[in-house]
Image (cartoon, rainbow, N blue to C red):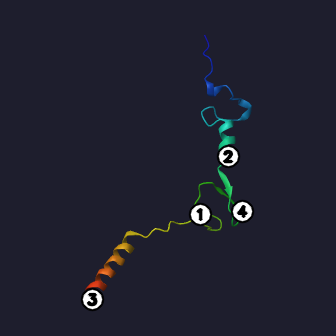
């Protein structure tokens, strides 16, 4: 007795060259390629890269948060200024 194929096995075809345990052709079409092009130098890069390895262009803005030591230093300077002026 042969089991019926699972729902996800119905569209799989050996001619597609896909791994049966990997993503389906529909998922690959839906989510696209892993590669993108750098907006600065047009080299192919991974879509999740933060910096282009060819030209060094930042693909995502670096975070603009102040680090903890900067906040502590500013608070210390304010306290020192208040003590000196009193």
Q: CA distance from mark 3 to mark 1?
A: 46 Å
Residue topped by disc 3:
84
Q: CA distance from mark 2 to mark 3?
A: 62 Å
Mark 3: few/some/many CA within 10 Å (<14, 14-19, 20+): few
In this rendering, the answer to whether 48 lies above or below 2 is below
Residue topped by disc 4:
42
Q: CA distance from mark 4 to mark 1?
A: 13 Å
User: Which structural element holds mark 3?
Assistant: helix
**Residue 27 appears at what percent x and percent y?**
65, 39
Q: CA distance from mark 2 to mark 1?
A: 20 Å
* Contact, mark 2 vs mark 4 (Cβ under 8 Å): no
| Residue displayed at 67% across by 53% down | 35
Residue topped by disc 1:
51
Which numbered marker is on residue 73? none
* Contact, mark 2 vs mark 3 (Cβ under 8 Å): no
Residue topped by disc 2:
32
């Amino acid at each position: 007795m042969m089991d019926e194929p699972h729902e996800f096995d119905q569209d799989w075809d050996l001619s597609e060259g896909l791994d049966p345990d990997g993503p389906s052709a529909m998922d690959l079409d839906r989510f696209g390629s892993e590669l993108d092009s750098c907006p600065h130098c047009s080299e192919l890069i991974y879509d999740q890269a933060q910096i282009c390895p060819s030209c060094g262009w930042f693909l995502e803005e670096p975070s603009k948060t102040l680090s903890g030591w900067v906040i502590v230093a500013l608070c210390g300077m304010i306290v020192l200024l208040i003590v000196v002026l009193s």
